[in-house]
Image (cartoon, rainbow, N blue to C red):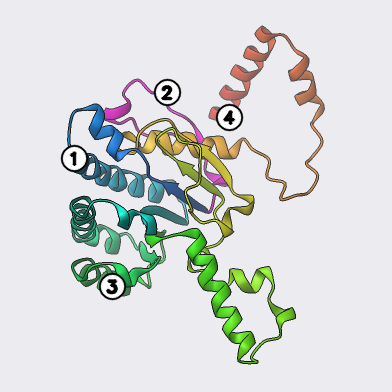
Amino acid sequence: MLILPASSPAHTEQTMVLVEARNLPSHVGIIMDGNGRWAQLRGLPRGAGHKEGSQAVRRVVRAARRLGLKALTLYAFSEQNWARPDEEVDALMLLLREFLLSEKDEILENGIRLNAIGNLGRLPSLVRAVLDPLRRASEDGSGMTLTLALSYGGREEIATAARELAEEVRAGRIDPSEVTPERLRSRMPSLAVGDPDLVIRTGGERRISNFLLYGLAYAELHFADVLWPDFDAADLHEAVASYQQRERRFGLVGKPAAPEQVAEKRSTPIASALHGAVAAVTRIAI
């Protein structure tokens, strides 16, 4: 089965990418980067970029749900982001509250389970007053799990998990030999939905920025040049299609190339193009 994404105003000239519904990543994480630069390029204040970025969140959450992803984790606000100017932080918190209020009905009607990870105690009461009830109201949702990483840091999450295990060792509840990668992993809220299969970063940067560090061990990475406010369903499909073209080996030996693959590599550019066209027609016919 193939899924063809719908076009969007932001990408009217973008080539649509076919995605195989049977080989989707289960858990996708997104580092949403580029709001400030988007605003700067247009001579607008940073707040305008964040506001436009919240519209991209709505688009991508809907696209992910329609695509059939089981879990989507969005890096919305890092522990380090608290060091930004107070005016910008306050604006981000208000946008978060507005997003939760405006998307409440859609989250509940579509069976989305809303989760949040990070040092949530640092969030202002105006956010917690909306976030906490919506998490409780959606906890039985059987659809996609949407996790918002808020006041989150990958190093901080690892340190917290290690500290909890150290306290158990000190109390004599477990032996030091029982501190295993699996036991450490079980203490990390970000991995309750499984390790990320695919992590996307927008904005053209090529770094992880303290996101899901422990779970990233074997994740596939996709870096998109598009700034987050312009990211849409077509970009998400492109990232998933890229993921589907990769062989995940998890440290093992990969499968040997099939004879036809070897022959294709040795063929001329014209023959390769013809072979690709025939394969595309065959897939669409199926």
Q: Earlier in the sequence, mark 2 or mark 4?
A: 2
Q: Amino acid at mark 3?
A: Asp
Q: Amino acid at mark 1?
A: Ala
Q: Is residue 211 left or right of residue 267?
A: left
Q: Nearer the viewer, mark 1 or mark 4?
A: 1
Instruction: Identify the residue at horizontal 37%, vertical 41% (top origin).
Output: 33
In this picture, is 266 found above or below 184? above
Disc 2 from disc 4: Cα separation: 17 Å
Q: Magenta stretch containing residue 282, yes or no?
A: no
**Residue 283 - label:** 4
Q: Earlier in the sequence, mark 3 or mark 1?
A: 1
Instruction: Identify the residue at horizontal 57%, vertical 50% (top origin).
Output: 197
**Residue 15 - label:** 2
Q: Earlier in the sequence, mark 2 or mark 1?
A: 2
Is disc 1 placed on a helix, strand or loop? helix
Write the start and end of the magenta stretch as one range: 1-26
For mark 1, what is the residue?
48
Is disc 2 placed on a helix, strand or loop? loop
In this picture, is 68 found above or below 201? below
Q: Quadrant location of the C terminus?
A: top right
Q: Amino acid at mark 2?
A: Thr
Dot 2 and dot 3 residues touching (CB under 8 Å): no
For mark 3, what is the residue?
132
In this picture, is 228 found above or below 119? above
Q: Position of residue 152 (x, y in %)?
A: 41, 61
Frontmost residue, 68 versus 29: 29
